[in-house]
Structures are given as structure tokens and as C-alpha cells.
Amino acid sequence: MQIDFEKASFKDFENIPGLDPYKWASLWTAYVNDRTSLGQFNYRQENLSGCGPEMQLDIKDNPIRNFVSLVSNDYLGFTQHPKVKAAAIEGIEQFGTGAGASPAIGGHYSYHQQLEDKIARFFKRDSAIVFTTGYNANSSSLQALLKKEDLAILDMAVHASVYEGCQLTNVKTFPHNNVDALENVLKNTDGKYRTRMVVIDGVYSQDGDLAPLNDIIKLTKYYGAYLLVDDAHGTGVIGETGRGVIELYDLYKEVDIITGTFSKTFAHVGGYLVASPELVSFLKFQSRQHVFSATLSPAAACISKAIDLVDEEPIWKELLWKNITYFKNGLLSLGLDVGATESAILPVKIGDINLNAKICNMLLQAGIYTNQINYPAVSRKDARIRMSLMATHTQQQLDKVLNAWDWVIKKEGLTINN
Ligand SMILES: Cc1ncc(COP(=O)(O)O)c(C=O)c1O
């Protein structure tokens, strides 16, 4: 079995016909070694200093040093906020280091209950369920809710966790943010399934653009479908008070299910689903990854503090937006293509997978830590460098990144704004 490493993506190694997993692994290892030798495998860098606008990285064959980092989704910088850290320590002091059990049989503590109440109120709703990851919030809920009689209708760009959650049901996708295409699917599937659930993101993780939620909600209501909105990247960032895209359109009551994560704005780890009390109660006992897995550790007590801080210290969102405006304008004035982003995610579209990897490495050599995003996270022709901004980036750090891009453009002779 031959795989052309030059053209390959991670997807090509998922399931190789005629080979067993050990053979896949050995081919994969050859691929990683080949790409590493070309400086193109910039993943799993070892961070020595913690999440922040600068990170100290231990990169093979390089001296340990600080990099300006654009890889964290800790948008408001709360992972390093003294009050959030203190709350985590307090949680551990009070409850110890682990929960010791799954929720139904001994692992549901007062800090979980407080978190469920708090995140429900944050979205002006009555009920929520907490998961150990944002990934689980989507995948295990969808698995519990949609079966072979049902249909999930997905924006093509939703997160991998949604696709995983839909493995037990029927799936139709529509092109990203294409409301007409969604309407066609809704029209053509009317009366053919028991339940139809449209699943979208609020802010899309690779493009940073927003869902046209006001149009989509009208369609789902009209055609009698349910709507799940995953606003992992919008929460804390979008809307007057950081409630995300739902706040932007004032659709708190209309959206059936809201999911999200505690690993971005809320500075820890875990996920949530906000919905009607009955649906939440059902999931507490029917969502398998919830029922059969131990709950969040007591350090998760810090999440409640991070949720409070969104309202108590709005300065962080203001600083984030100051940075977004400054940096986006800087990239645009260099002629770079940042697509339709309206959030803290700034993608620079490169196109070719190998050039993308090369540029990621050049930026790294210039002291800038970014993510290279390739197929299957985006389509094959849409490779890009993705950068996430934080409230705590300084203008000096952002200028350093813009200067590095200027250097890359000149060095690589990039055709800009094409
Ligand atoms: C849109 C979206 N949903 C869900 C998740 C999963 O969240 P977590 O990393 O907390 O499991 C992510 C993670 O990046 C995401 O981008």
C-alpha cells in the first residue's frame, strides 16, 4: 500500500484497506517522520509555561524560548486570572482531587449542581447538564436523542463531535451557512422521519464566522424541526454580555438546545447542554458518556467563578475586541485573506497543504506559535493558518505577529487577496 506523503492528510491513515491497525500505525509513523524531517509536523508542541499570550515551548532541536502564542481559545485570559485559580484551589481544598464516581452513583457534588444551575441561568433558561468535555456534550447527547428513525441535518462545518454523535442516525449535510440549501433539505425530508434536528455552530471554529441564526430559526420552526446550536466559540465573545450568537439575535427561548464548552472562555475543561427540564432530566440518565463516566474533578469549581467574571469584569471582553479589531485590520492591510470572520478566530487562507505547513514552521522560527489547519478539518483546498486572539495579548505582541506575516509574504512571494 502506497500513500503519497506529499499529498496525504491525516484522513488517509484512518482506515487503510488490506492492512491491520499495526500496519496503519507503521505507515503513519513513516509519514510523521518524513514530515518532521521537513519541519512540517508542528503538532503537540511541549508547552512549559501554561496557557497565555506567550508560551515557553520546548521544540526539538531548538533552544527553549518564549513564543507569541495564538493557539489558545482562552479568549478572555481567565486560565491565568487570580480569582479563577483561587476557586480551583479552593475546590480541591474542600473536595479533594477527584470525584471518585459517575454522577448517578456518588459522583454528583454541590459544585456540579452549582455549575448546572449557573450555566442554565447564564442562558436565561431553567436546566442544564454538565459533561466532562465539550466534545461529549455534543456527541453523547446526539447519540441519546437521535436514532435510526430520525434525521440530523448538519451545517457541513460543524465540529467533529457532532458528526460522531450522529453515527446512530441518518445524516444530511448542507453547505456552510447556506440557508436556501437548508430549506431544500427541510422541504424534501418533510414527513419522512420521526424527529429532525438541525445542528449548527454559533461561531464556526475554522472560519470564525457566525451562523445566520435568525433565518435558521424561522426555517426550523416553520418545518417543525428542532435546533441545536453549539456556541463553543461565541460564548464570552459575542453579544453585549457575552452570551454568544443567541444573545445577538435575542433567541434565548427559541433555540431548543444550546451546547458549549468550559474549555475556552470558561478556562477549564468540560461541556454543557442547556435545554428544557424534561430533556435535561432524560439526558442525565440516557446519555451514556455521562451516566457511565466519572464527573468533573473539584478543580472545576473554578468554572463557576469564570462564568461570574464574564459579568463582573466586562473589561476583558472589551480588551479582546480591541485586539480583534487591531489585528484583523493589520492582517487585511497586509493583503491577507481572513475570510468572513467576525470573532476572535482569525484564519489566514493559504490553500495548499504543504505551503501551509511551511508557513506555520516559518512563523514558528520567527517566534510565533500558530495552528496549521488542514483536511479533514477543512476541505482539501482550504488549508489555513488559524490564530485565536486573547484579551491579554499586548499590542507589541500583535505587532510582532504582523511583522512576521509581512516577512513570510515577502519571502514566499505570496499572492495576496486572491
Ligand atoms: C465548535 C466546537 N464544539 C465543541 C468542541 C469540543 O470542546 P472540548 O474541546 O471542550 O471538548 C470544540 C473544540 O474545539 C469546538 O470547536
Image (tube, rainbow, N blue to C red):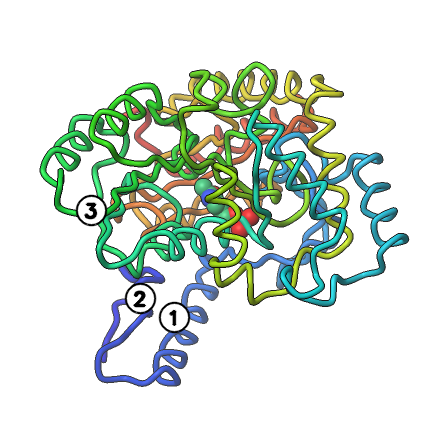
The image quadrant where one finds the N terminus is bottom left
Residue bearing mark 2: 5
Disc sitting over residue 31 in the figure? 1
**Location of residue 189 (image quadrant):** top left
Q: Specify whether 147 is left or right of 31.
A: left
Of mark 3 and mark 2, the one earlier in the sequence is 2
**Mark 1 vs 3: CB contact within 8 A:** no
The picture places residue 112, in percent across and down from the top left corner, at: 70, 48
Give the secondary structure at mark 1.
helix
Nearer to us in this view, 98 or 221: 221
The picture places residue 86, in percent across and down from the top left corner, at: 86, 41
The picture places residue 411, in percent across and down from the top left corner, at: 43, 37
Number of other residues with Cα within 10 Å of mark 1, as a class: few under 14, some 14 to 19, many 20 or more: many
The image quadrant where one finds the C terminus is top left
Against 134, residue 264 (above or below) is: above
Number of other residues with Cα within 10 Å of mark 3, as a class: few under 14, some 14 to 19, many 20 or more: some
Residue bearing mark 3: 172
Q: Is residue 361 visible?
A: no
Against 378, residue 9 (above or below) is: below
- Which residue is found at the position 42% from the left and 64% from the top? 35
Q: Specify whether 239 is left or right of 96.
A: left
Nearer to us in this view, 303 or 258: 258
Of mark 1 and mark 3, the one earlier in the sequence is 1
The picture places residue 197, in percent across and down from the top left corner, at: 30, 41
Against 288, residue 109 (above or below) is: above
- The span from disc 3 to disc 2 (Cα, nearest Å) is 31 Å
Amino acid type of the residue tagged 3 in the rendering: Lys
Of mark 2 and mark 1, the one earlier in the sequence is 2
Q: Specify whether 394 is left or right of 251.
A: right
Give the secondary structure at mark 2.
loop
Nearest to the eye among marks 1 and 3: give it.
3
